[in-house]
Image (tube, helix red, strand yellow):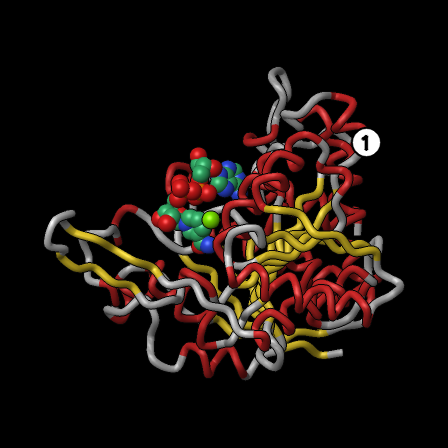
């Protein structure tokens, strides 16, 4: 196949980690007979520097003309909160996700077998293994609801943030979760607050209807507060978790920390028609940018997710993940994951080692 991939290298360590993921893609292409057309797309602080806007006109169109988008990271102290919104990198990230209609955010939290010691949980818990997929609704709920701020007569200023979900929004994210579980261990845990919130009661009723359509998938409901506890008590019990935007924001960060390192975790944001967007969960790490210190594995594993979810090519995804695990099993570490006494390798060397395994 020939794949057209938009590369949003971004700021800070973004260009460094994307560079290594591109090397891995090329290597996989040689083995599996794929070619690529890479389309560089400017977005983030680098775009503000170049054209005065973090989200230049035509960005979404350029991405839509591709099969998938690979993003490094955007942001940095030079383009901070004191700058107008159109110059801030975060504005661009929200805009691209919204313009591409990417309503499903997939955040795997996987404890790689060679990294069991990095897990902050009890050894027995780590040894049981952690391999879950958080499916977060990304374009609805309280983050997109109406905001209000007004003076009251007797209680000072009052603010409100509206949380709304439609059946349509819940059903499409729910379907994603059930379909995804069929590529995994066929278990879906839906997370809500149905004992309190009306949106959650609708969420739960739609999920129950879907569960009947997927009798081969085990289904359960968890309340969000219980889920937060279970994620640190026994994360090995989960396969696919599906939840609304704000709960997912918080729980996915919690889940990522139980695996020990942000330098290892990828993510995907997908919609129905538009190309999926693949990116590491970490930011632009300005403190180590340009020093060949960044861990490229999160971005390389994001490229694996691209094969699995946008190109429906599981063999290529498996090969990349196996190469990463093999390099880690041999003891190679970048500085962020190196145990005391281990001499770390740089970004480029880590990329090369993974390519060699492929
Ligand atoms: P960060 O994830 O960039 O860095 C947090 C810490 O982790 C730093 O010490 C950094 O050196 C380290 N780190 C992150 N990724 C690493 C990697 N691949 N290898 C080795 N070490 C790594 O988060 P921070 O510092 O809060 O944000 C920095 C900038 O990134 C901000 O401008 C923020 O807005 C932006 N950001 C962008 C995101 C995106 O593009 N999706 C996501 C999160 C933050
Ligand atoms: Mg977050």
User: How many numbered circles are shown?
Assistant: 1
User: Is 157 situated left or right of 55 in this image?
Assistant: left
**Badge 1, how many Cα within 10 Å: few under 14, some, many 20+?**
few
> Residue at 33% of width from left, 75% of height from top?
56
Residue drawn at the location 54% of the way across and 49% of the way down: 281
- Note whether residue 3 is visible: yes
Residue 242 locus on image (x, y percent): 65, 57
Percent across and percent down for residue 86 are 25, 67
Residue 103 versus residue 161 in the image, above or below: below
Q: Quadrant of ligand 1?
A: top left
* Residue 207 pos. (x, y %): 69, 65
The answer to which of 200 and 314 lies nearer the viewer is 200
160 left or right of 240 in image: left
Q: Is mark 1 within 8 Å of ligand 2?
A: no
Residue placed furthest toward the front: 154
Residue farthest toward the right in the current orientation of the protein: 216
Q: Quadrant of residue 181?
A: bottom right
Q: Is residue 13 above or below residue 127?
A: below
Quadrant showing the N terminus: bottom right
Q: Residue at x 50, y 46 (%)?
A: 250
Q: Position of residue 51 (x, y in %)?
A: 26, 71
> Would you place residue 61 above or below residue 312 in this image?
below
Assign a secondary structure to mark 1: helix
Up-down relation of residue 152 to residue 164 (above or below): above
Any part of residue 290 in sight: no
Examine the image and state in which quarter residue 237 appears.
top right
**Most foreground residue, 194 or 87:** 194
Residue at point 75%, 27% (across, down): 125
Give the labeled residue for mark 1: 128
């Amino acid at each position: 196949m020939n794949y057209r991939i938009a590369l949003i290298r971004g700021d800070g360590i973004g260009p460094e980690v994307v560079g290594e993921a591109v090397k891995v893609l090329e290597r996989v292409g040689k083995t599996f007979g794929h070619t690529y057309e890479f389309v560089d797309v400017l977005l983030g602080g680098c775009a503000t520097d170049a054209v005065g806007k973090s989200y230049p006109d035509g960005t979404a169109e350029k991405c839509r003309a591709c099969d998938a988008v690979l993003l490094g990271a955007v942001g940095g102290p030079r383009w901070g909160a004191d700058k107008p919104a159109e110059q801030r990198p975060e504005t661009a990230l929200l805009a691209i996700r919204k313009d591409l209609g990417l309503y499903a955010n997939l955040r795997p939290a996987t404890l790689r077998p060679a990294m069991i010691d990095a897990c902050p949980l009890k050894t027995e818990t780590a040894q049981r293994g952690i391999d879950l997929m958080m499916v977060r609704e990304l374009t609805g709920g309280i983050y997109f609801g109406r905001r209000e701020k007004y003076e009251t007569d007797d209680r000072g200023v009052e603010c409100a943030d509206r949380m709304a979900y439609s059946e349509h929004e819940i059903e499409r994210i729910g379907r994603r979760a059930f379909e995804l579980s069929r590529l995994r261990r066929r278990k879906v845990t839906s997370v809500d607050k149905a004992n309190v919130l009306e949106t959650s009661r609708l969420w739960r009723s739609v999920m129950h209807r879907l569960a009947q359509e997927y009798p081969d998938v085990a289904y359960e409901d968890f309340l969000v507060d219980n889920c937060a506890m279970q994620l640190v008590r026994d994360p090995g019990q989960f396969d696919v978790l599906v939840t609304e935007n704000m709960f997912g924001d918080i729980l996915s960060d919690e889940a990522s920390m139980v695996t020990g390192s942000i330098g290892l975790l990828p993510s995907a944001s997908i919609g129905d028609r538009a190309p999926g967007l693949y990116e590491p969960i970490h930011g632009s790490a300005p403190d180590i940018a340009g020093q060949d210190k960044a861990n490229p594995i999160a971005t390389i594993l994001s490229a694996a997710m691209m094969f699995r979810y946008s190109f429906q090519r599981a063999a290529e995804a498996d090969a990349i993940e196996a190469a990463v695990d093999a390099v880690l099993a041999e003891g190679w570490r970048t500085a962020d994951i190196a145990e005391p006494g281990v001499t770390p390798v740089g970004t480029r060397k880590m990329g090369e080692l993974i390519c060699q395994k492929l």
